[in-house]
């Protein structure tokens, strides 16, 4: 993640640095990413750059985590408007990711950011990510209805939430490196959701 020094920079300078980073990611794969090109484009010293980011992996993890945060934000909003159906909320967020989020940046940028999926797994397994998921669950748990679930305890619901979020986010990452059509991507994820529903979902008030 960027250092506090980075976030203390004027917003315009932050944007210039991040745009230079995105340009470099769009240009070459992870292994060929050049900090030298970035500092040249945004006219800063190498020493200054390393006050903002520890290394190039730090940059990629930061960008990937931004995608994660947006997906979780959408899920939280949906839960508050759909009667607390966690399966529907995750599905709606995933559809949004496919139709909007995943196509807002150039494909070369998306491909080069996500082509190395071990980085995505690193984000998911970080202690900070785990803590963030716990905090996210605490924020949304009161909006999750058990009327449509076969489980009732908070620990069970927390585990289901983690499984659903993990599956959705990893499938979002896969979107960036596949040539599948939007319909194929949605159908593949729907099949996973249908399988999970067999164990945890029932129609509300059934």
Image (cartoon, rainbow, N blue to C red):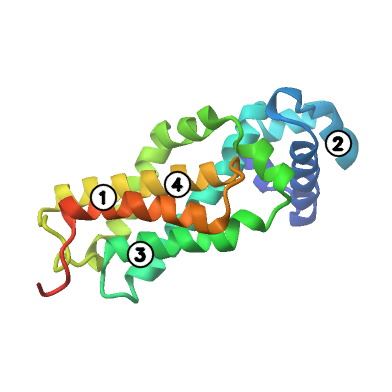
Relative placement, left or right, of 121 versus 47 is: left
Q: Residues under labels 3 and 1: Cα distance?
A: 16 Å
In the current view of this chain or complex, which residue is farthest to the top?
Answer: 31
Residue 16: x %, y % from top left: 81, 49
Residue 58 is marked as: none
| Nearer to us in this view, 142 or 144 | 144
Residue 89 is marked as: 3
Q: Is residue 162 visible?
A: yes
* Quadrant in the rendering for residue 146: bottom left
Kindly report which numbered mark, 4 or 1, lies closer to the viewer in this rendering. 1
Query: Residue shown at 62%/28% (left/top)?
Result: 57
| Mark nearer the N terminus (2 vs 4) | 2
Relative placement, left or right, of 45 versus 183 is: right
Residue 78 drawn above or below residue 130:
below
Query: Label 2 belongs to which residue?
Result: 44
Q: Residues within 10 Å of mark 3 (few under 14, many from 20)?
A: many
| Mark nearer the N terminus (1 vs 2) | 2
Q: Residues under labels 2 and 4: Cα distance?
A: 34 Å
| Nearer to us in this view, 50 or 117 | 117
Instruction: State how many labels appear.
Output: 4
**Considering the image in quadrants, where does the C terminus appear?**
bottom left
């Amino acid at each position: 993640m960027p250092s506090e020094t980075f976030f203390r920079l004027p917003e315009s300078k932050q944007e210039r640095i991040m745009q230079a980073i995105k340009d470099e990611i769009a240009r070459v794969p992870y292994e060929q990413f050049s900090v030298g090109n970035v500092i040249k484009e945004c006219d800063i010293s190498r020493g200054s750059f390393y006050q903002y980011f520890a290394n190039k992996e730090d940059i990629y993890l930061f960008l990937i985590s931004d995608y994660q945060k947006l997906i979780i934000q959408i899920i939280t909003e949906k839960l508050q408007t759909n009667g607390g159906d966690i399966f529907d909320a995750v599905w709606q967020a995933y559809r949004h990711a496919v139709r909007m989020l995943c196509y807002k940046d150039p494909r070369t940028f998306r491909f080069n950011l996500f082509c190395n999926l071990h980085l995505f797994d690193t984000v998911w397994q970080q202690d900070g990510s785990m803590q963030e998921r716990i905090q996210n669950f605490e924020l949304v748990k009161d909006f999750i209805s058990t009327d449509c679930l076969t489980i009732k305890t908070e620990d069970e619901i927390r585990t289901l939430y983690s499984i659903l979020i993990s599956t959705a986010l990893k499938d979002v990452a896969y979107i960036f490196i596949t040539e599948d059509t939007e319909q194929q991507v949605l159908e593949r994820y729907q099949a996973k959701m249908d399988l999970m529903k067999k164990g945890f979902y029932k129609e509300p008030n059934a």
